[in-house]
Amino acid sequence: MIPKPSIDDERLAAFRDVDFTYEDGTEALRGITLDIWKGEHIALVGGNGSGKTTLAKHLNGLLTPTGGNVIVGEFDTCKEPVARLARTVGYVFQNPDHQLFCPTVTDEVQFGPRNFGLSDSEIAEKTDRALEIMTLDHLKAEPPMSLSLGDRRRVSIASVIATDPEMIVLDEPFTGLDAKEADELMRVVNGINREGKTIILITHDMRVVAEHSERVIVLAEGRLMLDCRTRKVFSESSLLRDSGLTPPPVSQLAHRLGEYGVSPETLTVDELAEEIARLMEGAK
Amino acid sequence: MTGFVDLYSENDTFLHRLDPRVKILSVLLLSLLAFVLSTLYSLVVLLAFIFLLLFLSRASLSRTWFALRFVLRFMTLIVILWPIFDSAGTPVWATLGPIKITEPAVWRGFTSAARVGCLACVWYILMFTTSQRDLVRALVRMGLRFDYGLTIAISLRFFPSFMATIYSIIDAQRARGLEFNRGGLIKRSRKYVAVLVPAVVSALRTADSLSLALQSRAYGAKARRTYLRQLKMRRSDFAALAIVTALFVVPFVAKYVFFVHI
């Protein structure tokens, strides 16, 4: 079930039989084993309370397993401080308001690189690049807290890009964004992914997953339900239903039209249009 | 995490059913009683009575222990420290350099510890058996302005979620490489600006949307309020109040009118 590496053989993270129980006794993760490879574009999905955020927080050591172990890069997360792991794994929190505190956008974006003790010239270079990627140049001198939610989220993502991590976790980045803003955000994320950075996207938006992610990890009640290529996940609707997820409309339609010869692995509107056009050409 | 902010646990005992106003008054009277009583024996009897009520509230053992261990630690401290600083009376039991340990001082230590135990534990009875809503309802019925009551209720209600926000902010800043446990005291405390600012901003945003939600539900539109749940004194409430009042008045009169050493 675990897919092969996509770009090269470099493994970024390994979970081995990971359990995690919160102090109040809630078992949030049970027996998770998986590998994350350099350059992957992964969607982490599952219902509310399925353990997505708990799993993601293990990647930078904010949480450490109560059973099994998590290796990130060459480090065991139990033995390394979060600040060290944060150089490998950048984490964009769900609510941008939980991190913005600086007087200007530039200061906010510089905060991470400064914590890592980079030189002034490096900090300036990485900040400028992050601001450019997130098209925040014109807001540089603004106080981040007074921006719109969409802009605040872009600042929070820029502040993670500026630390130049190998892997970026985005925890439900579309909350409060309209479709256009969400698409724009995915365009930027895909650009970062093409540079070889690993993307972990936590989301409920199956359309985005279908169109952008190449691998899907499905969690339910803290267990790993599915871990495979996106096409395969959505073509097996029964597996999804068991995990409480609904495939995107395009996949559902492709499924219904399966008996007419439409491939059940169709994911996007373009692909579906092509499939249907192909069949209609054949019928003529 | 949130469970220990609110000590109340849902149960159906006579203490839970009692009118919250009666409970507040009773707890106040029993607290005053702890000051009226001045002998170790009477205070121990009062403490035993309070523990009995705590037991009857059927709070879970872990919760009771969580609440009591602070009190017990404090009581132990009083018993140990009192004789060291109070050397009045005879006989002297031991002399350690300038420190004289006398028998009456040791007993006075126990007496003070018992009094502190009574004062702390009696309030736990109220907190274990009365929901925050009932508490606020009672205060409002006892004459607190409704807006203030609502303010108290909202603060209590949002305290756990505010704490959750703070933990989430700390995580977010750690994920950006901030190390709270490094550097000197001043450097360290300055790092908390990164927590304080988002926490205050989040709280203000919550308060803002909360006030909109209140207004959109026509809060304050009517000068005279009506209540869905009316507090009503029942016979058992009057009986309980009478018993507690007697418990307070009898020793009070005995001590200050008939000069009984109690």
Image (spheres, helix red, strand yellow):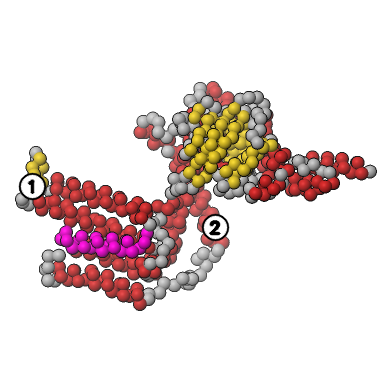
Q: Is residue A192 visible?
A: no
Q: Is residue B255 above or below residue A152?
A: below
Q: Residue at x 77, y 47 (%)?
A: A255
Mark 1 vs 2, N-terminal side = 1
User: Camera-side residue: B65 or A106?
Assistant: B65
What are the residue bounds of the magenta stretch? B38-59
Residue lying furthest left: B91
Q: Is residue B58 magenta?
A: yes
Q: Residue at x 63, y 24 (%)?
A: A9
What distance separates the C-alpha of mark 1 from that of mark 2?
68 Å
Name the spot of residue B162 as percent of width and height, x first: 46, 49
Q: Which residue is mark 1?
A: B93
Quadrant of the frame with the C terminus of chain A: top right
Chain hosting mark 1: B
Per the picture, the main secondary structure of the magenta-coloured stretch is helix
Q: Is residue A93 left or right of residue B82?
A: right
Q: Which residue is mark 2?
A: B212
Q: What's the residue type where badge 2 is placed?
A: Leu
Q: Is residue A54 magenta?
A: no
Q: Is residue B54 visible?
A: yes
Mark 2 and mark 1 in contact (Cβ < 8 Å)?
A: no
- Near mark 2 (Cα within 10 A), the count class, few <14, some 14-19 or many ≥20, is few
Q: Is residue B47 left or right of residue A3?
A: left
